[in-house]
């Protein structure tokens, strides 16, 4: 029943197209059935020595019906093929738009390979769901019309012979009822096996460096052979049962041809049936073989489509974990001069903040930026980097409010408490470091800010407004986030930094790359920022990947910057330059950083120490070191790691 509702929803939005396909199916069936009727008239006219005018007129009818049938059939087939492709695109787009809005719980429940299979194989036009939704249904409509019209004409010509011709029909009904569950179970198993194969390939290729580092190529080949063997068996089982059912629908109906030839031939020899009627009957029964085959295909593919529809429903049933209130508020993000400035460059500098560039300086910067984006040679890149460094900084977004956590708690559905009444406040321009052992809740705290997850208790305030009252677009545009693993896409460095944000200009890209200390190495890339990198940034180093990810976060001029243990792959000198550039270009930006690096912690305005989801210590670096508590222990371990790293590097 739910499958029917799903199909109805698809066609409810395409009523005119559905009506057109129904009309064309009925018209094509009527024309196909009319052809043998006029053929009967021609043959009977010849055998009965009818007038040449009668014979010529029926021959013209034959030609006209054949031509119109050809045109109608071609147009109908083209429309169905176009609709199949359109449905494939629309269904994939619909599922993708739904999935992209879902939270982490969905991706913990569904494997990546399984999701890919559902959006590719299940939604393929190759006799899969999109094909069934259009061609499968309307081929069956055409087949049913052809059978009904054909039987109506056959009954009109000779009811007795018609009754004999439809003798195999009850057998086909029994076959369908007996094989329905077997067909469905085999196709469901096949789709699961296809998902297993895609999941195995995704996991292997994503972790290819680990596979090679441990020399596990042969074990991966063996496991892939096993999942492919299971898929092959499932494919064979599905093809076997599908082929048997489809063939039986076609071949059993051909017994009707034999019956017509035997019974009709006897009647023709006895003179109770004309030769033209016998030829017409034979043509009708042969013509109905293919509609019966189409009905068999409909039953088989319908079961397969039902499996795919349930798999789509399984994903559509998952509701987004993060939703907006009915009338969300919006934070206005404007680029303004620091407080105390009246809009002039000199006043902005006098206020202690970065100067607002003049029109001439902006034109110079734009010209330099345009050339730098395409820079490819070391001397040219170095000269342009120097020119960029001499330019006045551009102020950050006007997020002047305070970020405040008020008794925030987080409990997972399993009952595990992750955060327990966490409260703190961060003012514009401050940097807060989150410190704690593994599993203490540091990443959960920073994930709450852009609402990747929502707290189960307490609230998060921005500019005096609860975060869950803001529109997701406004909130996430405010936040720049750099996760632990720098995830890059198979595109140019520039596009990885822009990340489909139309408000990010070339100026923003270059400025962000400079602050992230990426521009110093731009000459290494063959085409500058236009250089394409491999999937997940496989063609560049770990440090370069991290800098690109940093530049991506900074390019949107965030009011809040989240760095989740992402500076570990940067050397001390690069990290120091990063903090200096951040303070100069983004002086009002709130920064939250998860780190155990000693040099990083010393720069923080406030340090929060978490244990079992609760803040057990807070204060500045000097204050916490004097306490000689949890922070002191973690800080000493961080210093030791830094010293070992430097010694190893030397």
Image: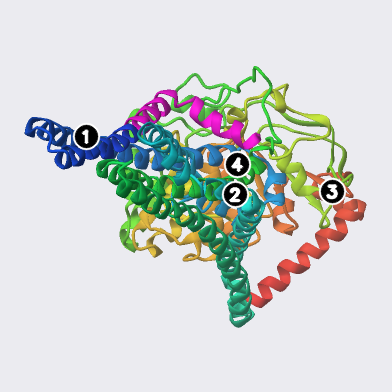
Q: Label 1: state its secondary structure.
A: helix
Horizontal and vertical percent for residue 106? 69, 45
Single out the mark in the foreground, 1 or 4: 1
Q: Is residue 225 left or right of residue 489?
A: right
The residue that label 3 is drawn on is 609
Q: Label 3: state its secondary structure.
A: strand
Horizontal and vertical percent for residue 398? 57, 27
The residue that label 4 is drawn on is 99
Q: Is residue 21 magenta?
A: yes
> How many C-alpha atoms fall within 10 Å of the one at disc 4: few (<14), some, or many (≥20)?
some
> How many C-alpha atoms fall within 10 Å of the one at disc 1: few (<14), some, or many (≥20)?
some
Relative to residue 22, is residue 199 depicted above or below? below
Q: Is residue 382 magenta?
A: no
Q: Earlier in the sequence, mark 2 or mark 1?
A: 1
Q: Please, what is the dominant secondary structure of the magenta stretch?
A: helix
**Which numbered disc covers residue 65?**
1
The residue that label 2 is drawn on is 176
Q: Disc 3 to disc 4, how far (Cα)?
A: 36 Å
Q: Label 4: state its secondary structure.
A: helix
Rendered-image quadrant of the C terminus: bottom right
């Amino acid at each position: 029943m739910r499958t029917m509702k799903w199909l109805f929803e698809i066609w409810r939005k395409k009523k005119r197209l559905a009506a057109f396909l129904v009309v064309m199916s009925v018209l094509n069936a009527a024309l196909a059935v009319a052809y043998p009727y006029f053929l009967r008239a021609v043959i009977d006219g010849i055998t009965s020595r009818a007038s040449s005018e009668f014979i010529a007129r029926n021959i013209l009818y034959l030609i006209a019906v054949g031509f119109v049938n050809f045109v109608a059939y071609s147009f109908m087939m083209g429309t169905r093929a176009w609709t199949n492709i359109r449905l494939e695109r629309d269904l994939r787009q619909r599922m993708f738009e739904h999935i992209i809005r879902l939270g982490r719980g969905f991706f913990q429940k569904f494997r990546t390979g399984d999701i890919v299979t559902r959006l590719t194989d299940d939604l393929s036009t190759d006799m899969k769901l999109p094909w069934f939704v259009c061609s499968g249904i309307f081929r069956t409509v055409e087949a049913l019309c052809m059978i009904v019209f054909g039987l109506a004409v056959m009954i009109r010509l000779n009811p007795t012979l018609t009754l004999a011709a439809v003798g195999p029909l009850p057998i086909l009904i029994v076959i369908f009822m007996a094989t329905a569950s077997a067909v469905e179970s085999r196709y469901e198993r096949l789709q699961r096996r296809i998902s297993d194969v895609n999941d195995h390939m995704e996991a292997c290729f994503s972790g290819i460096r680990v596979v090679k580092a441990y020399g596990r190529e042969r074990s991966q080949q063996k496991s892939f052979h096993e999942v492919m063997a299971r898929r092959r068996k499932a494919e064979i089982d599905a093809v076997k049962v599908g082929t048997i059912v489809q063939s039986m629908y076609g071949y059993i109906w051909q017994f009707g041809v034999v019956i017509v030839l035997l019974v009709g031939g006897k009647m023709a020899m006895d003179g109770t049936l004309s030769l033209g009627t016998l030829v017409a009957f034979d043509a009708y029964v042969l013509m109905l073989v293919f509609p019966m085959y189409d009905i068999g295909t409909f039953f088989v593919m319908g079961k397969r489509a039902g499996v795919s529809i349930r798999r789509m429903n399984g994903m559509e049933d998952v509701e987004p974990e993060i939703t907006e209130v009915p009338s969300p508020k919006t934070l206005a993000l404007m680029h303004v001069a620091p407080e105390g400035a009246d809009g002039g460059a000199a006043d902005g500098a006098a206020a202690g903040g970065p100067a607002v560039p003049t029109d001439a300086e902006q034109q110079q910067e734009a010209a330099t930026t345009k050339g730098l984006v395409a820079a490819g040679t070391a001397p040219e890149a170095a000269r342009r980097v120097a020119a960029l460094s001499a330019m006045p900084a551009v102020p950050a977004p006007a997020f002047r409010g305070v970020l405040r956590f008020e008794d925030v708690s987080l409990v997972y559905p399993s009952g595990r408490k992750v955060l327990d009444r966490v409260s703190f406040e961060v003012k514009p321009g401050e940097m807060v470091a989150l410190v704690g052992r593994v599993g203490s809740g540091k990443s959960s705290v920073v994930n709450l800010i852009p609402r990747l997850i929502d707290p189960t208790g307490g609230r998060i305030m921005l500019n005096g407004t609860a975060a869950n009252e803001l529109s997701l677009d406004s909130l996430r545009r405010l936040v720049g986030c750099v996760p632990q693993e720098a995830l890059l896409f198979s595109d140019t460095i520039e596009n990885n930094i822009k990340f489909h944000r139309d408000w990010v200009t070339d100026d923003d890209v270059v400025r962000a790359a400079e602050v992230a200390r990426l521009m110093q190495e731009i000459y290494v890339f063959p085409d500058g920022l236009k250089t394409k990198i491999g999937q997940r940034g496989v063609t560049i180093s770990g440090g370069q990947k991290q800098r690109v990810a940093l530049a991506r976060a900074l390019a949107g001029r965030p009011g809040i910057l989240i760095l989740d243990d992402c500076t570990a792959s940067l050397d001390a000198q690069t990290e120091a330059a990063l903090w200096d550039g951040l303070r100069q270009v983004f002086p009002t930006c709130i920064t939250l950083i998860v780190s155990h690096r000693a040099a990083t912690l010393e720069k923080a305005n406030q340090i929060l120490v978490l244990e079992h989801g609760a803040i057990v210590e807070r204060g500045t670096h000097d204050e916490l070191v004097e306490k000689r508590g949890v922070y002191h222990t973690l800080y000493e371990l961080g210093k030791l790691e830094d010293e070992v790293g430097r010694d190893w590097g030397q």
